[in-house]
Structure formats: structure tokens, C-alpha cells
Image (cartoon, grey):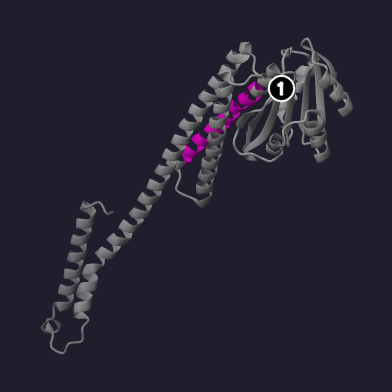
Amino acid sequence: MIHSFIFSDGKLVGRDLEVEALRLVRADKGLILWVDLDNPTEDEIKAILDGVFQFHPLAIEDCVAPSDLPKVEDYEDYVFMVTHSVDFSRKDKFATTEVDFFLGKDFLVTFHREPLRSVAMLKERAIKNTALSPRGPDRLAHALLDIIIDGFAPVLDELRNELEEIEELVLGQSASKAFMQEMLHARSDFSKLRQIVRPQRDMIERLARGESRMIRSKLLPYFRDLRDNLVRFEEAANGYHERLLMAFDIYLNKAAFEANEGIKFLTALTAITIPVMVIGTWYGMNFEFMHELHNPYSYRIVIGLTAVATVLTFIYLRRRRWF
């Protein structure tokens, strides 16, 4: 689906034009054009990316093909960016959606395969003409990046809550297969988040340093603010990941300790039966001449010896804290 917005002097003057009309708008250098491709068809992709804007084939290929890592590439009259929007829910867990940007001097083209709240919010602001007033496409790009990056905060909060639940379970519950899977899922979520935040921070860092000609100098402080937010999120994600690894180590140590305690208890039971087995085996041999068998007190002596040896073994193991 193709959504388009045309701005003049910071005001919305048209929207959702036909492809032919978009070509005319492109020819008018006094207008700012934002085209959003929301899960477009192959024909729509070709009509906009190749037909209207004539982007480089490699940039179109990178846009259409999914990419796991954010990146930024400069072309002659525009900059191509790959970013990721994140979302988290207890049902669907951690999810990311790729958002691609084509940023030029008088246009912004965004591309995504899934509906995004961040894009919907920016569209609503554009329609209501509130808190936007885009006098340049870089201002539009910053507004959208700002909403996308703000979306990291609730994701981190949800992951932190899940981490706290895991820590409580580690300290208060015995090991279970389902719990182990939960920890592995959480570890995977943190790894994905870190994999996205760091490259996205580096990408914004390049824009904040003014390395792209498509970012006006007066907007550089705003991009530096985005970079600072990503740095804060990265530090938080790293800290939570370290806590998760510590919880994982505690879980493994606790499981090993419980296994050792069980082995120790079984070993202690075996040790207690040693006197009974030794004495019983000795007197159970079918020798013809065993003087003890002819003693009228031999039965009581054997029982007493067995009992005393068993009690002494129990006391020894008790002092060694095997029970």
C-alpha cells in the first residue's frame, strides 16, 4: 500500500496521490514529499522505488531483502538507511520489524513489511499538523527515528520484568525443563536486542557527526540526542544481559548442588550398610569348622557387633554432615 504526504512551508497540502501525480510533485523543488510503502506489492515497489525516484538497483535490493543489522549507505543525492523497530509482548515475545529509509534533499521514502505504530503515529501527526512542521525531509526522518527509538524503552521494561521473575524463580524454585527453556528464550531476546541497538547507535552516530549531506547542521543536535538515548538503552541492555548470565550461573550451580546432595545421601546410605554386609557375608559362608557357630552367645554377639558398627558408622557420617 502506498501512502504519500506533500508538505509546503511546513504544512500538509496533499496526501495519497496517484503515482503519476507523485512524479509531478518530484519535479517541484519547493515541495517536500514523504512516501510510505506499507507492505507493498511488487508492482508498487517497482513503480515508486524505480519509477518515481529511480534509486540505485543495489539500494532497492537491500531494501527489499530482509536485513538483520542496521546500516547506512550514502549515494549521490540520497542516503539509504536500514533500521529496526522493536516490540515485545508476553504472547509473541521479542519481535523486530525492519524499516528502511531513502532520505533526499526534498523527499523521504519509508519501506516496511509490517504495520508499525511508529509510522502510524507520525502519519497521524502529519494529518493533524501537530508537533511536526517539517521544513525538510531530515526533520521527518528524525521524527520517525525518535518514535522508533522511544519504542525501545517499554521493551527494556518488559525484559527487565521478565528478568526479575527469572531471578526470583532461580532463588526460590527447583530446576525444571520449562524454566530452562524460559531462560534460554530470555537470553535470546537480550542477544537480539543488543544485536540491534549497537549497530543502530553506530548508524545514528554517523548522522550525528554530520557525515551525511542530507542532514542539515541545525538538526545535528537532535540526532545526537537520539544517539544518547541509544547509548543509554545499550548500557541497560548490557547490564540486564549480565544479570541474566549471573542468574543462569546460579541456576546451574544450584542444580549441580542439588544433584551432589542426592548423590551424597545415597552414598551415606550405602556406607551405613557396609557393616551389615561385611559381617553378614562373613558369617554367611558355609565353612564346616567355624568355632563361633558353636558358641551359645554367637547369635547375640553378631547382632550386637552389627548394631554397634552400624551406629558408629552413622555417627561418623553425621559428624561429616552427610546427613
Q: In the picture, which quadrant includes the C terminus? A: bottom left
Q: Amino acid at mark 1?
A: Gly
Front residue of 99/246: it is: 99
Q: Residue at x 45, y 44 (%)?
A: 173
Q: Residue at x 40, y 50 (%)?
A: 255
Residue 112 position, x and y percent, is 72, 34
**Residue farthest along the front direction in this orientation:** 76
Is 193 magenta? The answer is no
Residue of label 1: 104
Q: Nearer the viewer, residue 76 or 185?
A: 76
Left or right of 74 in this view: 271:
left
Q: Which residue is nearer to you in this view: 56 or 86?
A: 56
Q: Is residue 91 visible?
A: no
Check if residue 159 falls in the magenta segment.
Answer: yes
Residue drawn at (46%, 38%), measured in percent from left and top? 244
Which residue is found at the position 77% from the left and 33% from the top? 38
In the picture, measured across the screen, residue 92 lies left or right of residue 172, that is: right
Residue 131 visible to an observer of this rendering? yes
Secondary structure predominantly adopted by residues drawn in magenta: helix
Specify the segment rendered in magenta: 146-169
